[in-house]
Image: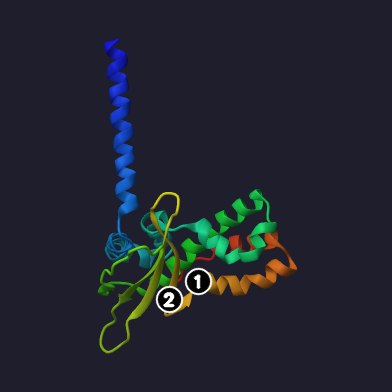
Amino acid sequence: MIKIVKKFFVASVVMLSTLFSGMAVASTSPYVLMQQTADKLFGDIKANQSKIKQDPNYLRTIVRNDLMPHVHVKYAGQLVLGKNLSSTTDAQKEAFFNAFGQFIEQSYAQVLTQYSNQKVEIESEKPVGDKTIVSIRVNVLQSGNAQPIKLDFKWRKNSKTGEWQAYDMAAEGVSMVATKQNEWSGILRQKGIDALTAQVAQSAKQPITLK
């Protein structure tokens, strides 16, 4: 009897710990998440410059570990597919989301080749209130009089979990989601989701190049 009670107590503690841990994540401000993510992401890029110069594709590993866990790939993918989403099967959706996740990783890594050791400034925190979508500006400062590289990360509050997740990044005002939605709409119309998935998967394999 004592053993049963003890097991029940341990299980309850684990369950409550998991619950409160999830609540802590869900209640975290998107600005706090942006700061934490940026610190880790840009810190790792800075610390691994020699490795990145030898193998630029290592940037993908950093993006995969530091940024992708905070990205809502499926939501971004749904925006890209737009009205075509309703005519795709579950299997087709899953295949597209997997390819699109790899594409996002490749695209973000390529954009981040512009960062080496510059100072990064994140927009000051603003009251979120009842907002479910927030855009946060990240400026990568350049040397001399050069204009900073402007990155805008869009965060969305998950209606089910309350967790804030990034779903789009705009480099110099150009949204990746909006750009790809426009670019790929013709392929979806003419060739269908399977052809688009194959093309996205192929694009995701492009090597990272230093510019």
Work out how far the residue at label 2 is from the one at label 1, CA to CA, in angstroms: 8 Å
Residue 62 in percent (x, y) is at 37, 59
Question: With respect to residue 207, does 24 lie above or below?
Answer: above
Q: Residue furthest top?
A: 1
Q: Which of the two labelled residues, at mark 2 and mark 1, occupies the earlier sequence position?
A: 2
Q: Residue furthest right?
A: 190
Give the quarter of the image for residue 71.
Answer: bottom left
Residue 186 in percent (x, y) is at 68, 72
For the question of whether residue 205 can be seen, the reply is no
The answer to whether residue 103 is left or right of residue 131 is right
Circle 2/circle 1 CB separation < 8 Å: yes
Mark 2 is on which residue type? Ala
The residue identified by callout 1 is 176
| Residue 162, numbered label | none
The answer to whether residue 35 is left or right of residue 110 is left
The residue identified by callout 2 is 171
Q: Residues within 10 Å of mark 1 (few under 14, many from 20)?
A: some
Question: With respect to residue 192, does 27 lie above or below?
Answer: above
The N terminus, quarter of image: top left
Q: Residue furthest front?
A: 130
Residue drawn where x is 45% and y is 54% of the image: 159
Question: With respect to residue 42, does 88 lie above or below?
Answer: above
Closer to us: 48 or 32: 32
Q: Residues within 10 Å of mark 2 (few under 14, many from 20)?
A: some
For the question of whether residue 184 can be seen, the reply is yes
The answer to whether residue 119 is left or right of residue 110 is left
Residue drawn where x is 28% and y is 69% of the image: 126
Mark 1 is on which residue type? Met
The C terminus, quarter of image: bottom left
